[in-house]
Amino acid sequence: MAGRFAPRPTRTTVRGGHVAVGAGVPRQAAGPGRVRDWVPDGPLDLGLVLGPLRRGPADPTFRAMPDGSVWRASRTPAGPGTLRVCAYGGGVRGEAWGPGAGWLLERLPELLGAADDPSAFVPRHRLLAMTRHRRPGLRLTRSGLVLESLIPSILEQKVTTDEAYRAWRLLVRKYGEPAPGPAPGRMYVMPAPRTWALIPSWEWHRAGVDNKRASTILRAVRVAARLEEAVGMEPGAARARLEVVPGIGPWTSAETVQRSHGAADEVTVGDLHLPGIVGWALAGDRDADDSVMLELLEPYAGQRHRAARLILLSGRVPGRRAPKMPRWDIGQF
């Protein structure tokens, strides 16, 4: 019987380095995908709507193509799936492959902001009125997936975006599985919760992820099913459930529900740069803190996250006064 069956990737074999979790998973044949056409009720900019789901220019789960189409690889409740979205005329076409194809197409309108109501936003500042006029296709996406937004948000805690993007890229490529269908090269579906739990400690270290962030992710994936249930909750209740997990605070929960729920009012607090940007744009105060930022955004109650998005899109940011935060690669230590 020896040699007839491949060894199972258990915790022992993984920690021993003999079996790489997720390795050897073949890419599915590029058969015909399922298709859905949808017509939005107003202007729609795919780049603006789906851009927040992209974690860096080399994100293995996201690809923007020269023809304007967007590819996403997601781990849905029905399994891994690949989605291609392109705009044509006044409509949008979605094509999907893999076990999760049906789930992705069913939620395509919400992904593209169908549940969002841009008309609810009333600009109180000239800057925001002008930015909204220049960006009429901005809608807030609702991915319907908590973990795929939560894990990269945890990786972004207390480090530069370059470091977080690098960690996400390395871990997804090594432990994820190839995106189903005819996806562009080197696209991967993020690892399953069980696979995240089996990643050896030294691989987190090589990816530049310190023990605090790695431990937070491990605690989150142990209760992945309960966290995914938060999609059916109101954003405030969803944030409260996420913050029960040690290591997940207001910054991380806000960054997550902004994407998973399309939460128009969940503004990010605890950010290093956002308060100064909002303070500079609305009051000329580059030293604003969270309390000042929230006071300035109070006229936009119910739409504070959208107001912050428009401020960032306006390009009105204070000039840099200090060098960029140094990048530390703990994998070299």
Image (cartoon, rainbow, N blue to C red):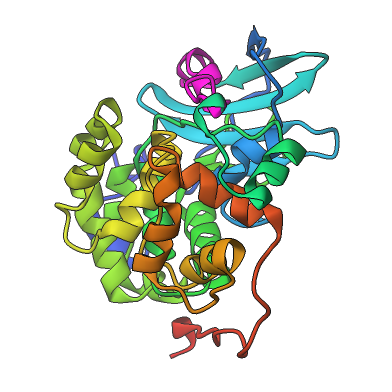
Q: Is residue 328 left or right of residue 18?
A: right
Location of the N terminus by quadrant is: top left
x, y (%) of residue 309?
56, 49
Asked whether the viewer can see residue 185, the reply is no
Residue at (49%, 34%) from the top-left corner? Answer: 74
x, y (%) of residue 320?
65, 82
Residue at (45%, 58%) from the top-left corner? Answer: 296
Image position of 20 with respect to 39: above or below: below
Location of the C terminus by quadrant is: bottom left
Q: Is residue 101 magenta?
A: yes
Asked whether the viewer can see residue 32, the reply is yes
Give the mark count.
0
Residue at (44%, 37%) from the top-left corner? Answer: 264
Q: Is residue 124 left or right of residue 75?
A: right
Give whichever of 71, 33 is nearer the camera.
71
Give whichever of 7, 15 is nearer the camera.
15
Q: Is residue 248 left or right of residue 199?
A: left
Q: Is residue 295 magenta?
A: no
Image position of 18 with respect to 29: above or below: below
Image position of 196 with respect to 98: above or below: below
Magenta segment, which residues? 98-118
Give whichever of 275, 260 is nearer the camera.
275
Q: Quadrant of residue 91?
A: top right
Q: Is residue 51 left or right of residue 163?
A: right
x, y (%) of residue 223?
18, 44
Q: Quadrant of residue 158?
A: bottom left
x, y (%) of residue 255?
41, 51
